Image: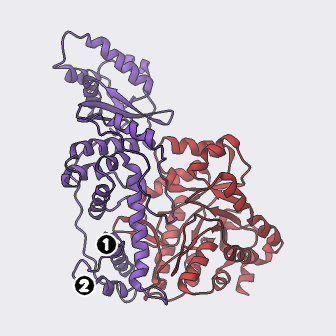
Amino acid sequence: MPANPFNNHTEYGIGIGLRVPHYRHILEKKPVVDWFEIISENFMVDGGRPLEILDKILEQYRVVQHGVSMYFGSADKPDREHLKRLKTLTRRTQTPWLSDHLCWGSVDGRYTHDLLPMPYTFAVARHTAAKIREVRDFLEIPICVENVSSYTEFHQSEMTEWEFLSEVVEKADCGILLDVNNIYVSSKNHSFDPYDYVTGVPHHRVGQVHIAGHTKYKKYILDTHDHPVLDPVWKLYERAIQLCGHTATLLEWDDRIPTFDEVHNEALKATKFLGETSGKSAAARAPEAVAA
Amino acid sequence: MAKRPVKAPRRARPKLSPPRIGSVRELRQFQRVMAEALFRPLTAGDGLQPTWSDGRTTRSVVEEFVKPNDRLTAMERVEIYARSYWFRVLDCLYDDYPGVHSIIGVKCFMKLTTAFLAECPSESFTLRNLGSRLPQFITDNPAFTAPRTALAVDMAWFEWAQVVAFDGMALPPITEDEILDAGPALKVALQPYLGIMQCSYPVDEFALALKKRDSALRGESSNAVSALKGKRAGARPRLPRREAICVAVHRQQNMLFFKRLEPEAYAILTALRAGRTLSAACVAALRNANPAIDWAARVREWFQAWQSLGWLCRRPARGRS
């Protein structure tokens, strides 16, 4: 298996998100799980039960941090207090890499707490890449940026989303957390071919993949993370793994959360695709293969 | 708990979104316009308000930067984000202030929190801090909670104290030997997570009655879209009658607890939090106390209890408490 610097040369398999309704089950039953992804912001606190739970999880499991509020695409500079708290947490978890979204969500110090899409321009790509570098240099761990699901497109955009993602990660020299569900959701909302997206990103930079469920409405699809993964997303995932090779994969399930076993079993369906494609990974991951 | 008026900072009124985004300044201008679209309260039909803050139509403002597609107009596309924003933040406050919405009812609570968020949007990266200014906002804007404002204010401070007690900082507790060795001149701090308050209503009993009815857990941050929660099932407990109490909100083994305090005990703890020495705190708190009571014995009992609960700690070098 090739080393990937963007997930710190680790060989993680299938993980699931650590969520409150599963705490008791995990701590009492100690199920075999390759790794858990935590939402960093839930543990960037000064004390109390969240950190107690986290420490117990860390005694048994590998944890990877995933953030929802770094807002690499915001015009504002990174918040130093935020960065300090995040760094403290990374020291605690020993997360091998850290992910957050390619989006914006705050301006002038006011927060939307949402993952808002960006205008895809070269100037915005330069600014975003510079922020990613600044954060990575401060935290001293590899960073993967995740593509978000979106519901709007902007007149000011100068390129496709996947071209923008590629531009940013090349300039920042960082990894990609490729969310195939988000690609599918956006492809339906913006009428593009999701396979063009998966084909068009630099595969050697993909350090992690997200899969999740979504909800279909009459005129658009909403990224709700409250369902099992749908078939078209599994197919897209299969293609992504063929192109990227064996990649750490995580199932997100954040609302109407079923039992731990149900979530874990859904995530383990990814084994089929990881197993089928792991042999092709070396060729797929090499930068030359991407260029070709 | 510092009580200061909630004042919304003056902000530049966003102009039109720039036609092209070739600099950080233009990116900021674009983001100000989009954020303004999201931060303005929704209409009764959960849509964007038809008129922009400067009198133009919202449609014309939005169409400057958002593309329509074959199914949705530019307005409809932004409305997806606006609804997501409002449902998320209102839901968060609903979770953090169950007592307040039980006191004033869900409809009034939604009006209160919508007005609060319109004036005080989040200034923190974490939703945990979203409601930190709500108790003061209720105090400053009594019309939203009338005629139950006094009870709502007490409950709001009490519920914010629970947020702090849940995950606030804990410093190494001071030992009994350290207290004895240092003598009365010792400056003791209270744990940062400890909340102490004087209330006009027994909000602790009301909160416990609510908890029995509804054992819902606090929500957690997530980046998925979810619908606003509906009204919880079950009858609301009877509203409490006016009764002056002093109460502490604290945690033991990371579980939340409430503890009633005698007024003199509350006065000592308040003085300690304000930076007084042990002896000065006791003198100030007991100046007008009933001389027939053996206060020395009682104060000793209190300190033993507080010390065993881990409430007391050394004052940090920079006076944080």
Q: How many marks?
A: 2
Real-space Cα distance between discs 2 and 1? 17 Å
Where is residue A5? Give x, y as percent: 68, 67
Is residue B79 visible in this depiction of the protein? yes
Q: Secondary structure at mark 2?
A: loop
Where is residue A152? Give x, y as percent: 46, 81
Residue identifier under label 1: B43
Q: Residues within 10 Å of mark 2 (few under 14, many from 20)?
A: few
Q: Nearer the viewer, residue A13 or A80?
A: A13
Q: Amino acid at mark 1?
A: Thr
What is the chain identity of the residue bearing mark 1?
B
Q: Nearer the viewer, residue A203 or A174?
A: A203
Colour displayed for chain A in the image of the structure: red
Where is residue A128? Give x, y as percent: 48, 74
> Which of the two labelled residues, at mark 2 and mark 1, occupies the earlier sequence position?
1
- The quadrant of the image that shows the C terminus of chain A is bottom right
Residue identifier under label 2: B56
Q: Nearer the viewer, mark 2 or mark 1?
A: 1
What is the chain identity of the residue bearing mark 2?
B
Q: Nearer the viewer, residue B115 or B18?
A: B115
* Chain shown in purple: B
In the picture, residue B250 is in which quadrant? Answer: top left
Q: Amino acid at mark 2?
A: Arg
x 35%, y 35%: residue: B204
Where is residue B142? Give x, y as percent: 19, 51
x 68%, y 48%: residue: A61
Is residue B22 visible in this depiction of the protein? no
Question: Are dots 2 and 1 on a single chain?
Answer: yes
